[in-house]
Amino acid sequence: MMREAQPRDIPALRAFLERHIETSMFLLGNLEAHGLGSNHDHATRYFLCHDDDEITGVFGVTRGGFLMCQMPGLTQREARAFVRALNGSSVRGMTGASEQVLAVLAALAIPSERWQFSDTQPLYGVRCAALPEDDAVILRRADEADRGLLEGWFTALGLETGLAAGEAAVADGRERTEAAIGSDRFVLMIEDGRPVAMSAINARAGDAAQVGGVFVPPDLRGAGRAGRIVARQLRDLRASGIERAILFAASDSAAKAYERIGFGRLGEYRVAMLKDSVTLGRAA
């Protein structure tokens, strides 16, 4: 049985997702930040699978068109039920545990040429107290003076990871810059008065944070800056109750940088992005 979540379901919904927190951070973070019924782009409609009165699976779709799921042992029947529930919804992409995402993508049956990117990435976690201390790292929030630099960095990050191409990468860079300026979830690493790296928290739930958007310009790589900015950002967040961190690595070099500061492998995570939004139930 599948039905849309109601406010009375929130405690059980949260408890189920927390048992699978490593691959549920977007689902949990959106629930914590926006609840049910918000108009924010990250606000999420949640669909629950039940066995009697027990939740066995959770599916989500944000107002911005991103799909998520958490259902160990997900079958094609259940994936198709989720897709039917989304009829008429606009979809831009999906993230989650790799095998679950693959099941939903198969049920979506969107032609392969419509996808910009669909790849499995290693998933990592760490207790923040175990991260190295480095008082020499200077961090600050982004401000309006950083806009041009950040638009370039975010565009480069999208192109480098394959998540966007051409003008879409530029537009995404502008959008992500707008969200980063002034945000307490985004930091710049400063050396000799200039930014040399960036890092962000893209989801937060309870005592856990998920890191994303780490970028070091190519000419500054190879000196450990990616690991140093992440370690310092997470150690600083302990003051606000963050005790553990999760991330997925977009490249072998990124994975090695995180392993060097103490992150351990948890499993696999999949990120899939469409070239353009697709409305479900319409001809592709």
Image (cartoon, grey):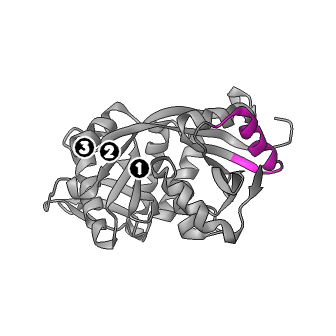
- Total numbered labels: 3
Instruction: Tell me which residue sits at (70%, 51%) in the image.
Output: 50
Res 205 visible? yes
Give the distance between the C-alpha atoms of the residues marked 2 and 3, in whole angstroms. 5 Å
- For badge 2, the amino acid type reads Pro
The quarter of the picture where residue 245 lies is bottom left
What's the residue at 68%, 52% (across, down)? 65
Q: Is residue 52 above or below residue 30?
A: above
Q: Nearer the viewer, residue 55 or 182?
A: 55
For disc 1, the marked residue is: 153
Left or right: residue 267 compared with residue 57 = left
Residue 220 circle label: 3
Question: Which one is nearer the viewer's eye here, 176 or 20?
Answer: 20
Q: Secondary structure at mark 2?
A: loop
Identify residue for label 2. 217
- In the rendered view, tell whether residue 62 sits above or below residue 272: below
Q: Are marks 2 and 1 in contact (CB under 8 Å)?
A: yes
Q: Which numbered disc covers residue 192?
A: none
227 falls in the magenta region: no
Q: Which residues are magenta?
A: 74-91
| Left or right, residue 228 beside residue 187 | left
**Residue 131 x, y percent position in the rendering:** 21, 53
The CA distance from mark 2 to mark 1 is: 7 Å
Q: Residues within 10 Å of mark 3 (few under 14, many from 20)?
A: few
Contact? badges 2 and 3 (CB < 8 Å): yes
* Vertical arrangement, residue 214 with respect to residue 162, above or below: below
Percent x, y for residue 110?
Answer: 74, 33
